[in-house]
DNA sequence: AACTATACATAATG
DNA sequence: CATTATGTATAGTT
């Protein structure tokens, strides 16, 4: 990619991470669309950001239809799985958010503020 | 890409199309995994080839879990179970922390500010 | 967000 | 399947 190599690990700087998320998300969806058109495939992409916002793409029909097709392919109606211990997840999330706040507060003010970003 | 440009239309030559499908499918899944790791996102990709074969990727948990999450997000919580007391507190705290992060991120209304000091 | 320098993906070959 | 020439994606910068 751009300048210098990229470590395949979570980007710690929140601003940097957010910018990368926007750019790469756009790139990924574009690639998915291309693959679908070039090779006549039906593709669905679902992305939940770290903060739980949903981004999606379904290249033919709707995501619902694709999910149905997926369900049929993998074998029948999905059995309800017991949720992972929600409380544990919550605590984990709280920790991460606190950490992020700390980074934001410490962090230098170098970046740009995209006030009306689509991301 | 490689040599020469690529028309964004279905590749007619079946052999060529199949090769491209394999390569780009691998590339797409790799990109998805990278985005997930770098930006801490939960991503699901479902690909049905032109001949109906399924390829999939879920970066956290299973595809089923992701589909469930998708359903909840888009359809709203159908029938919420009563939350346990500490769970409610946790949710509340998460909300507050997220709000704080948002304020911190959007905070200073700027233009360009490359200095580490306030502008 | 626009720009630029590079790393990467990949179409065409071998 | 390995190589390689080129077009893209995108990290860092401003």
Image: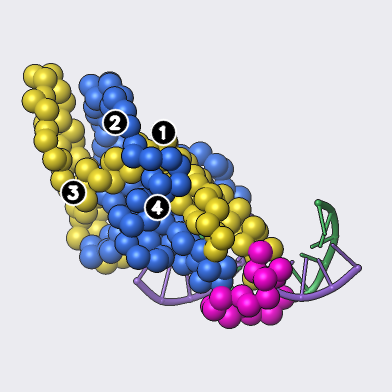
Chain colours: A blue, B yellow, C purple, D green
Quadrant in the picture for residue B90: top left
The answer to whether residue B16 is seen in the rendering is: yes
Q: Is residue B111 left or right of residue D1?
A: left
Distance of mark 1 from mark 3, alpha carbons?
21 Å
Residue found at x 46% / y 67%? A33
Give the labeled residue for mark 4: A69
Distance of mark 2 from mark 4, alpha carbons?
18 Å
Q: What chain is tagged by disc 4?
A: A
Residue A80: mark in rendering: 2
To the question of a shared chain for discs 1 and 4, the answer is: no
The vertical placement of A15 against D9, above or below, is: above
Q: What chain is tagged by disc 3?
A: B
Stretch in magenta: B2-18
Give the labeled residue for mark 3: B75
Q: Is residue A9 left or right of residue B44?
A: right
Task: State the SS at label 4.
Answer: helix
Dot 4, how many residues are within 10 Å of its Cα: few (below 14), some (14-19), or many (20+)? some
Give the labeled residue for mark 1: B61
| Residue B110 spot, x, y in % from top left | 24, 63
Task: State the SS at label 2.
Answer: loop
Distance of mark 2 from mark 3, alpha carbons?
16 Å
| Residue B78 spot, x, y in % from top left | 13, 40
Task: State the SS at label 1.
Answer: loop
Q: Is residue B108 left or right of residue A1?
A: left
| Residue A106 spot, x, y in % from top left | 31, 38
């Amino acid at each position: 990619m751009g300048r210098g190599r990229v470590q395949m690990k979570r980007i710690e700087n929140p601003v940097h991470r957010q910018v990368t998320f926007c750019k790469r998300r756009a790139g990924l969806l574009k690639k998915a669309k291309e693959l679908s058109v070039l090779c006549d495939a039906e593709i669905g992409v679902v992305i939940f950001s770290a903060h739980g916002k949903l981004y999606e793409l379904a290249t033919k029909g709707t995501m619902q239809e694709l999910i149905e097709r997926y369900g049929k392919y993998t074998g029948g109606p999905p059995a309800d799985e017991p949720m992972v211990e929600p409380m544990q997840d919550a605590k984990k999330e709280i920790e991460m958010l606190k950490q992020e706040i700390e980074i934001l507060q410490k962090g230098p003010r170098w970046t740009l503020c995209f006030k009306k970003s689509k991301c």
